[in-house]
Amino acid sequence: MKRPYFSTKLGKLYLGDSENILSKDLRSSLSNKVQLILTSPPFPLNKKKKYGNLNGKEYKKWFIKLAEIFSTIISENGSIVIELGNSWEAGRPIQSLLHLESLIGFVRNKKAKLRLCQQFVCYNPSRLPSPAQWVSIERIRTIDSFTHVWWLAKSDYPKADNSKILRPYSDSMKSLLKSKKYNDGVRPSEHRIGKKSFLKNNKGSIMHNVIEIEQIDNNRAVRLPQNIFSIANTVSNDFFLNECRRKNITPHPARMPFELASFFIEFLTDPGDLVLDPFAGSNTTGFCAERLGRRWISTEVNEDYVKQSKIRFLDPILKGKKKECTNGINERNKRTGNG
């Protein structure tokens, strides 16, 4: 049995190739036991990055094969959530279809028997202009400010509860609930709104499938679910980044946003469930899982990133010694891929 590189109260992080670890070392112990695989695998980039990525047909073949490994370890009502960014044709100002072809091949892998539950968009305007040649230099394309997030499962009805990720009500909805007055009747869309349709206080509104790391409209308040918003705002005084600076460590360049990880952990799991990230990078997934009371397992092939990810679990917030921020400006992740 392979030993973890390090462990915490709720989780374990393994150093090594995820395919080998999940299909050999941990296969029997994880079979049908993982409730959520949440990951951002290396994107099919044209330029080789330190954190690893393949290209072309090689990438597509590798990605599709992952479906077989993932499907054997998630529970029957478990989920797979994968973040994928756009890719571009080498030397050309046009987008590649490789990431979409890879996703379709992943879902249609007959040995995996998966289905697509829903697509999400993660909007992050802090991302650097990319590809720089076409965006910043020649100025013939716009900035890619979002990534696609795909939710897949073995069942049409995986465990999910959107009442756990309710957005705070808008001011107008709060006024409506207080006044108990609104225009009922048939809308132009032909939807019939009853006299009491909007009078029940559900303690928040249902989340959209666009996750705003920063709000699109600066005049509109951020309305991420409260628990997610609270966790995300710990980044305003990010312990991990501060410690990396203090120790002169270059942090993983493509860290997963706290908001994204916490959103899906809350939505698709319960406390005590097992969450897996096979491409952990600096292990945001494991950190958020630990903070939210979920068990977790992560794997990462780069030892430098595994070493720096240990810093996350020294954060006093995990021991309840540090009061969480509920206000402040987030130090936004400038991302291009996984982590």
Image (cartoon, rainbow, N blue to C red):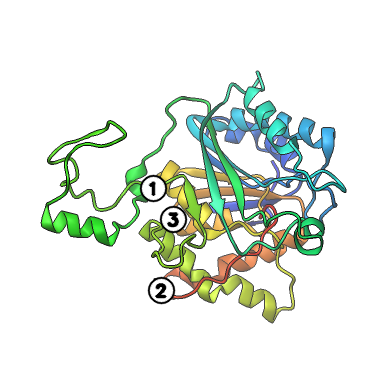
Q: Is residue 251 above or below residue 209?
A: below
Residue ID for mark 3? 292
Q: Quote the CA–CA distance across marks 3 and 2.
A: 19 Å
Secondary structure beneath label 3: loop
User: Which numbered disc covers residue 99?
Assistant: none
Instruction: Judge left or right: residue 245 versus residue 160.
Output: right
The one nearer the camera, 198 or 240, is 198
Seen at 52% across and 71% down, the residue is 330
Q: Which comes sooner in the sequence, label 3 or label 1?
A: 1
Q: What residue is rendered at 50% in x and 57% in y? A: 259
Residue 260 % position (x, y) = 52, 53
Could you tell me the amino acid type at mark 1? Met
* Foreground tag (2 vs 1): 1
Identify the residue position indicated by label 2 in the image: 327
The one nearer the camera, 271 or 189, is: 189
The front one of 228 and 71 is 228
Q: Residues within 10 Å of mark 2 (few under 14, many from 20)?
A: few
Amino acid type shown at disc 3: Leu
What is the quadrant of the N terminus in the image?
Answer: top right
Q: Would you call the spot at circle 1 few (<14 residues within 10 Å), some (14-19), or many (20 or more)?
A: some
Q: Is residue 289 visible?
A: no
Taking the image as drawn, is residue 224 in sight?
yes
Q: Nearer the viewer, residue 12 or 145?
A: 145
Q: Image quadrant of residue 328?
A: bottom left
Q: Secondary structure at mark 2?
A: loop
**Residue 40 against residue 103 in the figure, above or below:** below
Q: Earlier in the sequence, mark 2 or mark 1?
A: 1
Report, in whole angstroms, how far the alpha carbon at label 2 lies from the one at label 1. 21 Å
* Location of mark 1 (residue): 207
